[in-house]
Amino acid sequence: MNLFSSIYYLGPQGTFSEHLANTHREFEHLEKIPVSSITQIYLDVISNTKSLGLIPIENSTEGSVNESLNGLIDYNIEIVDELNMKIEHCIFSIEKTTNEIKKIYAHPQSIGQCNLWLHKHLPSVELIPTSSNGQAIQLACNENNTAVIAGKHNQWLSLNLLCENIQNLKENTTRFNVITAANVNVDIEYDCLYKTSIAISLDDDQGAGSLIGILRPFEEKDIPLTKLVSRPTNNDKWHYIFFIDFVSKYNEINDLLDLVKIKSSFFKSFGSYKISDTLIA
């Protein structure tokens, strides 16, 4: 990380991305730059090769972040690290009790991660999606009878903390990718396990079982897949891109990628990086 001078993340003030950017020790020396959207993170990283981007890629409750997956396809970046952050949601409001709340602002991912609690305790409240939890905080700070779903780290707010830990799953976790547009020379540790992230697509005329054929080398070499999800392509109706993560020793990666490339109509690799076992609170 010493090669870089700045890191872009999803703002504004109050987001989980901001909290991670400001508290993770590997980012201490970096200038922290908030931006308005995940797509803007990709654009800024592309234009500044001395920068990193912090991308929320997947949540353990709500699954993949679609805007983040789209950016992987649309822009030429490399994933250099992954971070897992524990996500605990709270209700903040100008009001002193939940009985006074008529609207709740929150990012769609946060609403989904807390939907069971919301349906049980605030079934008649209007849920208003925002581009980030930071934007939701800004709106809730200026309106009566409103609340926001946000992280507990936002207790600096001039709002009342009404409810804690309202997420569906106690161990609710979001995985972040750290990306760059620079060519990074990785110090290889051959005894370590690496995660490799790729995307593939198949032509309709490749026939039944074509996806199974692509995945068979992983089974034959006893290489575990840690992700297999699909997204529609932007230019062909009912045609899909498959995002795959697999875990292997570093010296096994290239042979596997060659086998996958041969059978794919589209192939893109986003890089290989050490597996993160640390859960950041």
Image: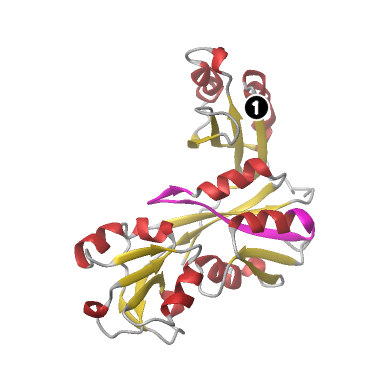
Q: Position of residue 164 (x, y in %)?
A: 31, 73
Q: Which structural element holds mark 1? A: strand
| Residue to which mark 1 is pinned | 266
User: From the viewer's perspective, is residue 99 above or below residue 178?
Assistant: below
- As for residue 242 lying within the magenta part, the answer is no
Q: How many marks?
A: 1
Q: Residue at x 47, y 56 (%)?
A: 174
Question: Can the viewer see residue 61 in this picture?
Answer: yes
Q: Position of residue 220 (x, y in %)?
A: 52, 20
Of 53 and 124, nearer the camera is 124
Q: Position of residue 67 (x, y in %)?
A: 55, 49
Q: Residue at x 42, y 57 (%)?
A: 109
Instruction: For the N terminus, give its image quadrant.
Output: bottom right
The magenta stretch spans which residues? Answer: 46-64
Query: On the rendered structure, is 223 left or right of 45?
Result: left
Q: Residue at x 74, y 61 (%)?
A: 51
User: From the viewer's perspective, is residue 266 above or below residue 171?
Assistant: above
Of 135 and 201, nearer the camera is 135
Question: Can the viewer see residue 171 in this picture?
Answer: no
Location of residue 161 (image quadrant): bottom left
User: From the viewer's perspective, is residue 231 above or below residue 182?
Assistant: above
- As for residue 51 lying within the magenta part, the answer is yes
What residue type is disc 1 on?
Phe
Of 221 and 26, nearer the camera is 26
- Please, which colouring scheme is shown? secondary structure
User: From the viewer's perspective, is residue 61 above or below residue 89?
Assistant: above
Location of residue 105 (image quadrant): bottom left
